């Protein structure tokens, strides 16, 4: 590797840059790079708290449209986050599992 010196002289800029990204390097990590590495592993503020997950299922378009409309209406009525609305909807369905099973003709 070509040795690159800083304009001030003496520093091997290439080695210092390599040390910043080389995970096997035992050399000092500049404070700014270290702070960036620490904050990069933190979750964004909006995702702290309740763990979130994304899932997808195929469903009839009418059902998907009805669910989207319900969530939208409840959002504007309550101004609660849509994930909280969906959690409440799922909680209500789970509380009525026996009715869902009867409707589906439990096997």
Image (cartoon, helix red, strand yellow):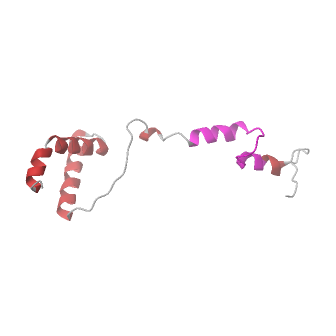
Comparing 90 with 85, the one in front is 90
Please tell me whether residue 13 is drawn above or below residue 42 in the rendered image. below
Name the residue rendered at 40%, 35% in the picture: 49
Q: In the image, 1: left or right of 22? A: right
Most distant residue in the front direction: 107
Instruction: Give the total of numbered labels.
Output: 0
Reply yes or no: does residue 37 show up in magenta.
Answer: yes
Q: Position of residue 27 (x, y in %)?
A: 78, 40
Q: Quadrant of the C terminus?
A: bottom left
Name the residue rendered at 76%, 46% in the picture: 19
Magenta span of residues? 17-40
Q: In the image, 15: left or right of 60? A: right
The quarter of the picture where residue 98 lies is top left
The quarter of the picture where residue 91 lies is top left
Most distant residue in the bottom direction: 61
The quarter of the picture where residue 11 lies is top right
Q: Quadrant of the N terminus?
A: bottom right
Name the residue rendered at 19%, 43% in the picture: 94
Q: Position of residue 48 (x, y in %)?
A: 43, 37
Reply yes or no: does residue 9 show up in magenta.
Answer: no
Q: In the image, 45: left or right of 89? A: right
Dominant SS of magenta comes to: helix
Comparing 57 with 12, the one in front is 57
Name the residue rendered at 70%, 36% in the picture: 31
Q: Position of residue 84 (x, y in %)?
A: 28, 41
Q: Position of residue 44 (x, y in %)?
A: 48, 41
């Amino acid at each position: 590797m070509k040795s690159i010196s800083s304009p001030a002289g003496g520093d091997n800029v290439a080695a210092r840059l390599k040390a910043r990204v080389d995970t096997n390097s035992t050399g000092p990590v500049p404070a700014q790079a270290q702070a960036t590495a620490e904050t990069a592993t933190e979750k964004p503020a909006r995702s702290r708290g309740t763990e979130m997950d994304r899932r997808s299922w195929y469903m009839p378009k009418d059902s998907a449209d009805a669910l989207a409309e319900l969530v939208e209406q409840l959002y504007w009525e309550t101004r609660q986050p849509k994930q909280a609305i969906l959690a409440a909807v799922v909680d209500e369905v789970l509380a009525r599992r026996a009715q869902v099973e009867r409707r589906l003709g439990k096997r």
